[in-house]
Amino acid sequence: MKREPIYGMMAEFDSATALVDAARSTHQAGYKKIDAYSPFPIEGLAEQIGFHHDEVPLVVLIGGIIGGLSGYLMQYWMSAVDYPLNIGGKPYHSWPAFIVITFEMTILFAGISAVFGMLALNGLPMPYHPVFNVPRFAFASKDRFFLIVFSSDKKYDPAGTRQFLETLQPRSISEVPS
Amino acid sequence: MTEPYKTVDDGNAPVIEPGHTFGTVTEKISAIVLTRPASNGWFVGFGLAFMLTMMMLYAVGYLFVKGIGIWGVTIPIGWGFAIVNFVWWIGIGHAGTLISAILLLLRQSWRNSINRFAEAMTLFAVAAAGIFPAIHVGRPWLAYWLFPIPNTMGVWPQFRSPLMWDVFAVSTYATISALFWFIGLIPDLATLRDRSEKPALRMIYGILSFGWRGSARHWHRYETAYLLLAGLATPLVLSVHTVVSFDFAVGIVPGWHTTIFPPYFVAGAIYSGFAMVLMLAIPIRKIYGLEDFITERHLQNSAKVMLATGLIVAYGYGIEAFMGWYSGDRYDAFTLWNRLHGPYAIPYWALLICNIFIPQVLWIRKLRTTPAALFCISGVILVGMWLERFIIVVVSLHRDFLTSSWGMYYPTRWDWMTYIGTIGMFLAAMFLFVRLLPMISIFEMRTLLPEAEVKE
């Protein structure tokens, strides 16, 4: 795949409020391929940049169902099918005794799905990313807030986008090389 | 988690002292890891803890050579220190998950400054606990039989036994705690990556942070996953000590066979866990100057949790005693008499003093806000909770139905070396943790600051 030499245009803001306002204005101005970076989660910011579908709950649900079923069926198969053992006259398929492990396996699989599903959907681990080429971006994990318009956006043009971002009164604007 | 902390004065000490900004919070916490030199005190403390760890490895190595005959376990007391210490450590671990998961769901934002090291404490406590079941089986090289692994004998574990449930509960708990701790660390590792000056450190923290960049989409999925994990960890943590208590309650031994065990074990676990959190938090906040973040409010709240769970534990003892009389079962009645007047009466009375009587001083507000007093009371509670497990395991077993099968249990030096050694291992891991990773969750602290609020 041929890479664009420029990844996007990035603006730096001072506060969470400024970032949320800027994200809203940029999205309303017709820029659809944008992203925002903050040092902590900001409620509602993802909606402002046009992110609405979070698949993590579905992944966790599927993981939990698989975990529960495999936990129960494992015990059933091992205790009642593959090697039936008479323990104190209890039935081979003594389901009340199987509930605890079924529960634990549900939690285990759902929890693992939550973590690895979140990482996979986020495309992490990703050691290299163009935004790290901007030296100021090191402050995105401290006390600065960043907004980027990707160069793949239909409306993107270097001069026009820069001009638009300047109307949002950021601290600084930088071009992001890829 | 995103709910900003109220800055109005509601009569309580604040969660963060006023005057902090995103920058100061970040610098203060990350500087402990990145720039602060390790003091002599740290080296002495870590060295001692490490020596104790080596002592444990020696004791365990000797155990593997000689077998469990070197311990004090006999028939009828087949479960000695190994199970006492296992239950004690697992219980201590509970506070971490309670703080990080249950208090998150209850929107107790004060938890944000103590959840990280409480979670680390949980991990290390579960690691210390995990040693005991593995080494107490007599033939530890066969410990993998606990897991349903296909083998040449063609047999499977016995899933109707609470001991098997325990294997699944504890290993799930260890896994979920580790994941919860690690995903909480990812954004802070990114902060350390961006703050560190040394290329090697930047490389290490960069790899560990998975290239986290704080994108709004990532945060959104991250928060969803974190919240769901908290929702999953909440029933999990309650199930773990419940299942541990089944190990006893499903047996028919007088003193074990009671329905009060699950709730009373869980309450006891949280009781001892908060005591351990305080015993760690009080010196750490002093030494690293973190009084701004771990404030009087945290100490107060932890003390209140201890008071409440301590009363539940006291109720558990009361019901045990009541049922000993009310059930009309002569063996239950004898168990109660034996605890109060038998050969182990001194540990039982010590248990009542440590767990029920002394902690009542926490009703006094002045003591709840005096770190030194809280530290001592927490120590007393930890001793008391250890004695509780000793009473449950040893005293119930040593005199059961037939006088001909009565016996006594005396721990040997190897028992003590293993037990004290695990405390050393736990402390050594904590010493390393405070130097290598941010011990307070930086990004969650940022959300507590007034400037984190988005004004419409």
Image (cartoon, coloured by chain):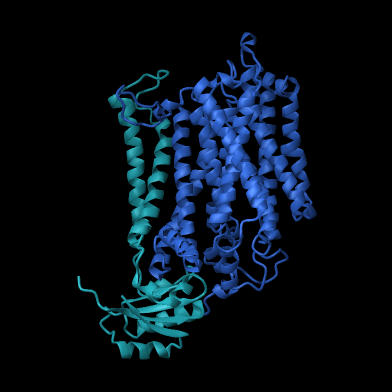
Residue B79, given in percent of the width and then of the height, sits at: 57, 24
Quick check: can you spot residue B70?
yes
Which image quadrant is residue A5 in?
bottom left
Instruction: Give the residue drawn at x 39%, y 43%.
Output: A106
Which residue reaches farthest left?
A1
Tell me the cyan chain: A
All told, the count of numbered labels is 0
Instruction: Give the residue drawn at x 51%, y 30%.
Output: B133
Q: Quadrant of the N terminus of chain A?
A: bottom left
Instruction: Give the residue drawn at x 65%, y 20%.
Output: B409
Chain B: give its colour.
blue
Image-based side of B433 in relation to B41, left or right: left
Relative depth, front residue between B94 and B227: B94
Residue A42, given in percent of the width and then of the height, sits at: 47, 71
> Vertically, is B217 above or below A8?
above
Which image quadrant is residue B74 in?
top right
Which residue reaches farthest top?
B404
Q: Quadrant of the C terminus of chain A?
A: bottom left
Relative depth, front residue between B140 and B51: B51
Which image quadrant is residue B317 in?
top right
> Vertically, is A2 above or below B95?
below
Residue A70, given in percent of the width and then of the height, sits at: 32, 39
Residue A141, given in percent of the width and then of the height, sits at: 48, 69
> Vertically, is B55 above or below A4?
above
Image-based side of B297 in relation to B187, left or right: right
Quick check: can you spot residue B266?
no
Instruction: Give the residue drawn at x 52%, y 53%.
Output: B101
Image-based side of A67 in relation to B238, left or right: left
Relative depth, front residue between B272 and B433: B433
